[in-house]
Amino acid sequence: MTGPPGDAPRPPIGRGAFLKCKEGKIVGFDRIDRISEEVRRELDQILREDVRDPRLSGMFSIVRAEVTRDLRFCKVRVSVLEKDKREQVLAALKSGAGFIRRELGKRVQLRYVPELIFELDTNIEYAAHINELLNSAAKRNEQDEEKHD
């Protein structure tokens, strides 16, 4: 499938829009990325508006949803601000996974509604810890410089 002479060959229809190649590596899979983001948005809305589990109280957020290429599974990364409620929130999500999946199927038009696998995400807490360490190191550095002056 090529165009007029002198033009670069075009990819077969339906293939070029899905993969981005850079230096021989797959950089992204646009369709799956779009589906994952849509699933994340809908899951957040379902959890906030439709799920009536008292264990889902407090500050939590859906950080990321990673749908597999075959649309069969979705890893959902959940961040919970309060340490004491993490296990409760994760247990509530796992016990309500069937209901949440059914609601997701009503809202998102996909061939398969992925099975939801909920995981705790501690990246925000880890970043705050690193930031705290950097700030304390900077303060110590300033104090050392003041002593030497």
Image (spheres, rainbow, N blue to C red):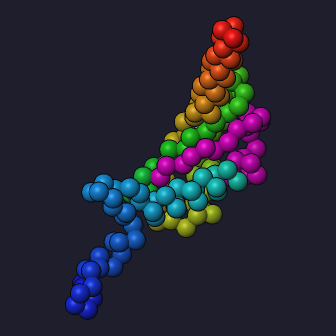
Q: Classify 117 as above or below 144.
A: below
Residue 39: x %, y % from top left? 58, 56
Residue visible at 68% across and 17% down in the picture: 142
| Residue 2 magenta | no
Q: Is residue 95 visible?
A: no
Residue at 26 percent across and 92 percent down: it is 4
Query: Is residue 138 visible to us here?
Result: yes
Look at the picture and state if 122 lies above or below 10: above
**Where in the figure is residue 59, as x and y percent of width and height?**
75, 36
- Most distant residue in the top direction: 147
Query: Of 19 and 143, which appears nearest the observer?
Result: 143
Depth check, front residue: 29 or 2: 2
Q: Which residue lies furthest to the front in this view?
A: 149
Determine whether 52 is above or below 122 in the image: below
Q: Give the residue drawn at x 60%, y 52%.
A: 40
Residue 141 position in % (x across, y down): 64, 16
Which of the image's four quarters has the C terminus?
A: top right
Question: Is residue 74 or residue 30 the one in the foreground?
Answer: 30
- Image quarter hosting the N terminus: bottom left
| Left or right: 105, with 60 as reference point | left
Residue 121 location in percent, x, y?
57, 34
Residue at position x 54%, y 36% from top?
119
Q: Give the range drawn in magenta.
A: 46-67
Q: In which quarter of the image is residue 27?
A: bottom left
- Is 47 within the magenta? yes
